[in-house]
Image (tube, grey):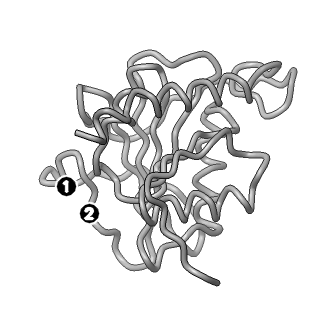
Amino acid sequence: MRSRFLAWPVAVIAIAAFSQNSLGQEKGSATPGRAVAYVPFDGEKTTWHDGFDRYDFVMDEESLAIKPFKRDDDERYGVKAPAKGLRRCIVVVPKEAAAGNPWSWQGCYWNHQPQTEIELLKRGFCIAYISANATLKPGKEWDAWYAFLIEHGLSPKPAFIGMSRGGEYSYIWATTHPGKVSCIYADNPGGNPG
């Protein structure tokens, strides 16, 4: 029940943070006056909760090439572990995008307690994810996924949602790229020295 109760306030905080950070910027623009047009995602379209369109991709960890990926039917709303040397990437798009193409980046645990992500989708946010676990920490792969999403016209400042290890990973990426984050919602974030 606690997580359902938190979905609305978290969505409101993310929307407020995004709105404040994007003042003076044109739709999808990293700098004022430079618009980036939305580019629809390629690949097979499946559905996620409440009928939102889901696009799956796979990234090669060596070349950082991102290609459309056909997910297994038995994944339903979830995601399976990637094959060695690959990262699974997912983007779910709203039925109608909010101004500025805001998006939320889930730091870990795809589809666990997705109430906040569903609420953000209803409010026009895209939701993105890249494989993350104890050995798949933020690094060049996260940078490549970010660049891919920005090239598709999403806002240059995502709102992060980080639960447990996802909170730790959100902070790692945000402290490395402080100008590229609108806000972080961390629910019981993990933290490891080093």
Q: Nearer the viewer, residue 64 or 136?
A: 136
| Above or below 43: residue 40 | above
| Above or below 179: residue 98 | above
Q: Classify mark 1: helix, strand or loop.
A: loop
Q: Name the residue located 61 percent from the left edge and 33 percent from the top edge.
A: 154
Q: Amino acid at mark 1?
A: Asp
Residue 5 spot, x, y in % from top left: 31, 32
Q: Are marks 1 and 2 in contact (CB under 8 Å)?
A: yes
Q: Nearer the viewer, residue 176 or 101?
A: 176
What's the CA distance linking mark 1 and mark 2? 9 Å
**Which residue is outermost to the left?**
74
Q: Nearer the viewer, residue 37 or 170?
A: 170
Q: Name the residue located 69 percent from the left edge and 27 percent from the top edge.
A: 28
Mark 1 = which residue? Answer: 72
Mark 2 = which residue? Answer: 80
Residue 187 spot, x, y in % from top left: 44, 52
Number of numbered labels in the structure image: 2
Q: Quadrant of residue 120?
A: top left
Q: Amino acid at mark 2?
A: Lys
| Above or below 87: residue 2 | above
Which mark sits nearer the N-terminus, 1 or 2?
A: 1
Residue 161 spot, x, y in % from top left: 49, 47
